[in-house]
């Protein structure tokens, strides 16, 4: 599986980030768009206690199926294997026919920028303040890009979006949005999330 080298910075001002990206020569490759994903946790993954899932995601310009596993909450702790498929709903239906039903359906919005080979995404999720993710080919590239954008490395967050939810909702009872059946912008905040800090 491919190792993802990425860091998140939470509670950011998108206009400020866009200005810094533009000033540094970055290019917006995809404007803000709605993304949909269905996450499946296969039984053998749950039984083994692995922090992993199968994700079917409509990214706006393509649909991907990804097996993603978090070995640790670190800069290079995520592993993934991904393919492109032709149809979001039919892919979900095929997995359902095999007995693999999704645990959660999630919406988010994402804007994608490139600075050299480094990808920077601006992410919006239901009930969360805005955050960015920096993904690069090396740890040095992630660190230097975060510095270019004015972020302090000590503020970096690693792991899935559930880690970001836990930062904003420290009393969250459960793992995060992976345990919420419908995560949509039109949905109300689940009561078990507690208060936002």
Image (cartoon, helix red, strand yellow):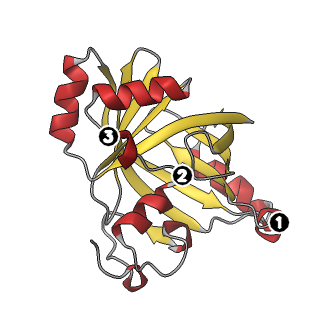
Residue 149 vertical placement versus 129 (above, below): above
Between marks 3 and 1 in the image, the one whose residue lies nearer the viewer:
3
Say if mark 3 contacts mark 1, CB within 8 Å.
Answer: no
**Could you give the CA–CA distance between mark 3 and mark 1, rounded to whole angstroms?**
36 Å
Could you tell me which quadrant the C terminus lies in? bottom left
State the CA–CA distance, disc 2 to disc 1: 19 Å
Task: Report the residue at 46% width, 41% height from top.
Answer: 7
Sort mark 3 into few (<14), some (14-19) or many (20+) by Cα contacts within 10 Å: few
Q: Quick one: label 2 or label 1, which is nearer the N terminus?
A: 1
Q: Position of residue 78 (x, y in %)?
A: 63, 44
Sequence-wise, which precedes: disc 2 or disc 3?
Answer: 3
Q: Which mark is residue 159?
A: 2
Q: Label 2's element?
A: loop
Q: Residues within 10 Å of mark 2 (few under 14, many from 20)?
A: many
Q: Compared with residue 165, is residue 189 higher up or lower down, i.e. above or below?
A: below
Q: Position of residue 19 (x, y in %)?
A: 16, 28
In the rendered structure, find residue 48 and report the number of the disc placed on it: 1
Q: Is residue 122 left or right of residue 118?
A: left
Q: Secondary structure at mark 1?
A: loop
Q: Quadrant of residue 149?
A: top left
Residue neighbourhood size for the residue with mark 1, other residues' Cα within 10 Å, grouped as few (<14), some (14–19), many (≥20): few
68 shown above or below 1: below
Circle on res. 152: 3
The numbered mark, 3 or 1, whose residue comes first in the sequence reads: 1
Quadrant location, the N terminus: top right
- Judged from the image, the secondary structure of the residue bearing numbered disc 3 is loop
């Amino acid at each position: 599986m491919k190792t993802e080298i990425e860091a998140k910075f939470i509670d950011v001002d998108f206009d400020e980030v866009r200005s810094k990206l533009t000033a540094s020569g970055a290019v917006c490759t995809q404007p803000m768009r709605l993304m949909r994903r269905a996450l499946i946790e296969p039984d053998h993954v749950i039984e083994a206690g692995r922090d992993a899932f199968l994700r079917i995601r409509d990214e706006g310009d393509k649909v991907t199926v990804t097996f993603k596993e978090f070995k640790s909450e670190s800069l290079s702790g995520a592993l993934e294997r991904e393919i492109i498929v032709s149809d979001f709903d039919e892919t979900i239906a095929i997995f359902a026919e095999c007995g693999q039903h999704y645990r959660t359906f999630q919406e988010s919005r994402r804007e994608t920028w490139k600075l050299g080979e480094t990808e920077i995404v601006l992410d919006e999720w239901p009930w969360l303040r805005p955050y960015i993710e920096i993904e690069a080919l090396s740890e040095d590239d992630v660190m230097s890009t975060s510095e270019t954008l004015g972020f302090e490395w000590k503020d970096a967050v690693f792991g899935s979006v559930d880690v970001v939810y836990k930062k904003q909702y420290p009393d969250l009872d459960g793992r995060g949005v992976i345990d919420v059946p419908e995560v949509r912008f039109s949905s109300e905040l689940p009561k078990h999330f507690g208060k936002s800090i």
